[in-house]
Image (cartoon, rainbow, N blue to C red):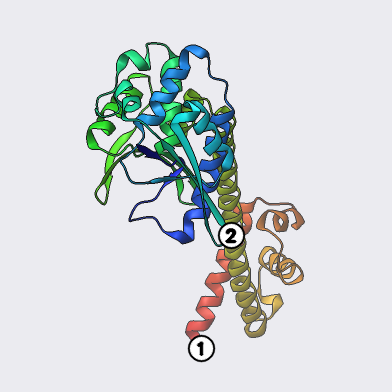
Amino acid sequence: MFTLCTGMHRSETDHDETDGDKLSFSNDVKTELCECETPDKARTALKYGVLYGFRGNEPYFVTYDKKIAGFVRKLFPKEQTELKEHRSGTTRTYCISVKGNELGEAYGFSEGRINNVLTGDSDDITGAFLRGAFISCGNVYVQKAGYHLEFMPGTEEKCRELRRLINEHGMSVNMSHRGKHTLLYSKDSENISDILTYIGAMKCSMEIMNIKILKEVRIGINRSVNCETANMDRTARASAKQLEDIGLIFERLGRDKLPDDLRELAEHRLENPDMSLRDLGKMSEPAISRSGVNHRFERLAKIAEELRKKQ
């Protein structure tokens, strides 16, 4: 008897505090996949994919969604399946047992190599196979740190075969290890979106791209705000230094000792401590450029520095 629990597979490295966040989007994807129409000619490939994602005789796969459990159960003859509900506090999980070794043998379940006859040579059939595999051994997470899609079919040989099939159809996944388990993964948002579209989760694929766009917009806004804040800080520091220099000059020398152009600018700055250099230049008679204003402030700063040295 095969014990097949669909949904999230628990490994030694899973952490309970993040399960809710991780499961949310994966559950949305699997729900959409279960609602996806599968042509009759592709149903065998779909069932084969579900069985191919099976990792062993222990219940590594769980689902908290009764609809997903019901969908998987309906794929197989009713007399060969058993649905069990487990409760732990307020949490419910659903487990499906598929009875009969002949079923696994018919789909080449005991072998790591993918049966190319069953996966077919069309996108509809191959997509159905990968859809089934994702339902039973896949997850996709959208978190602050980024994006992550993975398949964990149980053995390194299965991972190699699944990777070959995915890469042959224009997508890409890498192979890695998590503890004693081998898995396939992708962290590229566009590649993840392509895989989800290929297996039939088009709505969730679009959601990932929308999330990416929103993140990029937020990053752009934050950069703009940070840049503006930095400019304002620099302007405020420069204005404070100019006011300090002007105050020292007026106290030590008096206003009348300054040339007319410098005295005019100094008085405008005292009256308008927050005004930009460009606007100060427009107030001059005649008007001068921003660089001209900056040059006059440099002259004032030099005079103030000489007075400090004398002191």
| Dot 1: element | loop
Residue 80 at what x, y percent from top left? Answer: 44, 30
- Which residue is depicted at the point 50% across and 29% down? 78
Residue 30 at what x, y percent from top left? Answer: 52, 36
Nearer-N-terminus badge (2/1): 2
The span from disc 2 to disc 1 (Cα, nearest Å) is 79 Å
Report if residue 186 is visible in the image.
Answer: no
* Residue type of the residue flagged with mark 1: Gln
Q: Nearer the viewer, residue 268 or 236?
A: 236
Q: Which mark is residue 311?
A: 1
In this view, the residue farthest toward the front is 79
Q: Crowdedness of circle 2 by 10 Å Cα count: few (<14), some, many (20+)?
A: few
Residue 40 at what x, y percent from top left? Answer: 51, 13
> Where is the N terminus found, in terms of image quarters?
top left
Q: Nearer the viewer, residue 142 or 39?
A: 39
Q: Which mark is residue 195?
A: none
In the visual, does 90 lie left or right of 178? right
> Which residue has dot 2 on it?
90
Mark nearer the viewer, 2 or 1:
2
Q: Crowdedness of circle 1 by 10 Å Cα count: few (<14), some, many (20+)?
A: few
Q: Answer above or below: position of 85 versus 128.
A: below
Report if residue 71 is visible in the image.
Answer: yes
Q: Answer above or below: position of 32 versus 226.
A: above
Q: Quadrant of residue 28?
A: top right
Residue 63 at what x, y percent from top left? Answer: 50, 45
* Residue type of the residue flagged with mark 2: Thr
- Which residue is depicted at the point 51% across and 26% down? 197
